[in-house]
Amino acid sequence: MSETRKGMLLVISGPSGTGKGTVIERLMAQDKSLVFSVSATTRAPRPGEIDGVHYHFVTDEQYDQLVADGAFVEHATVHANRYGTLRSEVYQRLERGENVVLDIDVQGALNVIASEKEKVSIFILPPSMKVLRERLTGRGTETPEAVERRLHNAVWEISQKDHYEYKVINDDLDECVRTMQAIIAAEKHSSAYYSVEVPEE
Ligand code: 5GP
């Protein structure tokens, strides 16, 4: 049997506080075919974040230059900071057959959904707005104003959920990860990505 797989572009969004980061970490730890697209951002690193691993941390000037150079697949301002998906993180890897994970906000995802013919888009939802508020408050990393800003954004973000091919509720982390794995496993067999020749014998 001769099989070839093209790389899959996996677009994952969800409001801040849905546990998207943890879900993506778990998926990546369990499926070595997934590679993370490291975005450029003007936001300051949080404790423990490593330049080049979590983000490429850039100055406003460097970010402007990347925009001018056409280096981004998409870029957006999120919670008062700027973020962009670098072409260099995406296209060569897809050519090599790697499955590229974009952890991007809804504005950016809607642009990618509109511009990329082949992609798999998944929206991660909180079980309720009450739980979302509790998670945002509980993480203790945000000021009360930032929590309110994130909740306000979440209402708009959730209103865009039907533009995604898949929606998954993160009520139970294990179950959410299992569902995402099932979607990815099925999509790997989509004719958009998967070619197979059946031999004579
Ligand atoms: P954080 O600052 O908490 O790491 O991320 C804030 C938001 O920015 C998250 O929703 C994250 O998915 C989004 N984000 C991260 N990188 C990108 C990117 O390259 N483009 C866009 N549009 N959003 C991004």
Image: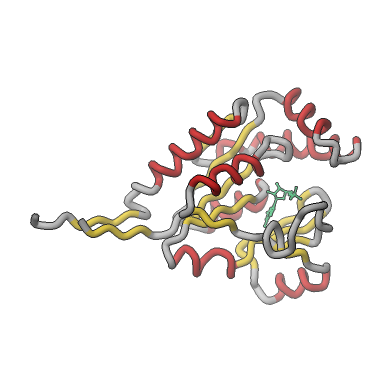
Q: What residue is rendered at 48% in x and 53% in y?
A: 32
Q: Image quarter for residue 130?
A: top right
Q: Can you give x and y, in whole percent of width and height, for residue 42 in the image?
A: 80, 61
Q: Quadrant of residue 171?
A: top right
Query: In this figure, which colouring scheme has been used for the structure?
Result: secondary structure
Name the residue rendered at 65%, 53% in the picture. Answer: 108
- Image quarter where the C terminus lies is bottom left
Judge whether 129 appears above or below 54 on screen: above
User: Position of 120 compared to 85: left or right?
Assistant: left
Q: Nearer the viewer, residue 103 or 114?
A: 103
User: Which of the two residues, 26 or 76, is positioned nearer the viewer here?
Assistant: 26
Q: Quadrant of the N terminus?
A: bottom left
**Left or right of 182, for residue 189:** left
Q: Residue at x 32, y 51 (%)?
A: 191
Q: Is residue 108 left or right of residue 43?
A: left
* Residue 133, percent from left and from top: 79, 28
Vertical side of 82 occupied by 88: above or below: below
Q: Is residue 103 above or below residue 87?
A: above
Measured as percent of width and height from the top left, residue 30 is found at: 50, 45
Location of residue 6 in the rendering, given as x and y in whole percent from the top left corner: 39, 60
Count how many numbered circles sit on residues in the image: 0
Q: Is residue 119 left or right of residue 156?
A: left
Residue positioned 50% across, 38% down in the render: 180
